Image (cartoon, grey):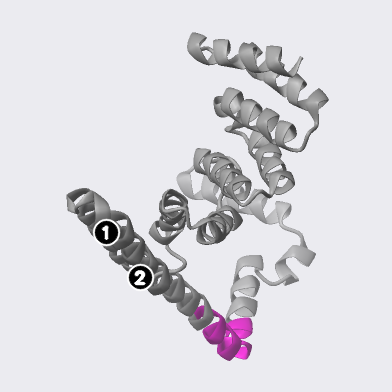
Amino acid sequence: MTDAEVRKGMTNMTAQKVTKKELQEPDFLHEWLEKTVAYARQYRKALYVSSISVLVVALVAAGWFLFRMNLEGKAQGLYQKTYNNYLKAQPLVRDGEAIKGYQELVKAYPSSRAAHIALYRMGNLFFQAQNYDEAIRSYEKFIEQASPEGELVTLALSGLALSKEAKKDYSGALASLERALKTKSGVLFEGILLRDMARMYERLNDKKNALEYYRRAVSVTKDPSIVILLKRKIATLS
């Protein structure tokens, strides 16, 4: 059999496998391409608008990210400047100067991370200056924005409690200490918080709870000298 006869036989076999119906049907890929092109032509305006919208969203997101980076950088610079000036200033004036610097920071960049930390620092400085109303305001603003998982929120709640205690708001102080103890970092300051709570109960003339919390404080306190003082307090109340 010649090569020509072999090729002719293969052609006949292939032709037998392709039915008349299949020959009459349009090519699938060709049909799909035609539909895609027709769709693009019909809705090209909508597709164009969608593409532009996606691009605009991406540009806005990138712009916002760069804006936040710039803002945070400026806020951090002002925070560091205030802190450095605090370290260099004379003890009699440095607290007041630091408060002014932190207030400027909070006013200029209220949504920045640095401004948030500045609120906590101001709470401490106002407390040291015995300006308990401003200390309470600063601590409360910080706590509103703080993550419950951070250590500073526990310390801020403790500072808030001490400020309220100074104003003889013992019930309010106790409530702040209870919140501090329930925070994630509360366990790190458990001994301090428990003895402060015991003191609040004592000031509220609740001897039963005062004794309970002093005893709980003894059970978690590691410092022997503090344990001795707590046991003396328990003996006095008993």
Q: Residue at x 65, y 27 (%)?
A: 194
Neighbourhood count class around disc 1 (C-alpha, 10 Å): few under 14, some 14–19, many 20 upward: many
Sequence-wise first label, 2 or 1:
1
Q: Position of residue 235 (x, y in %)?
A: 69, 12
| Nearer to me, 82 or 16 | 82
Q: Left or right of 137: which side holds 83?
A: left
Crowd rating for badge 2 (residues with CA inside 10 Å; few <14, some 14–19, many 20+): some
Residue type at mark 2: give it: Glu
- The amino acid at mark 1 is Thr
Residue 82: give its label: 1
Q: Please tell me whether residue 238 belongs to the stretch shown in magenta.
A: no
SS at badge 1: helix
Tell me if residue 41 comes above or below residue 123 in the rendering: below
Labels 2 and 1 touching (C-beta < 8 A): yes
Along the horizontal axis of the image, is 34 left or right of 21?
left
Looking at the picture, does residue 19 appear above or below residue 64?
A: above
Residue found at x 50% / y 42%? 152
- Relative vertical location of residue 175 with respect to residue 67 in this rendering, above or below: above
Query: Could you say which is closer to the camera, residue 35 or residue 59?
Result: 59
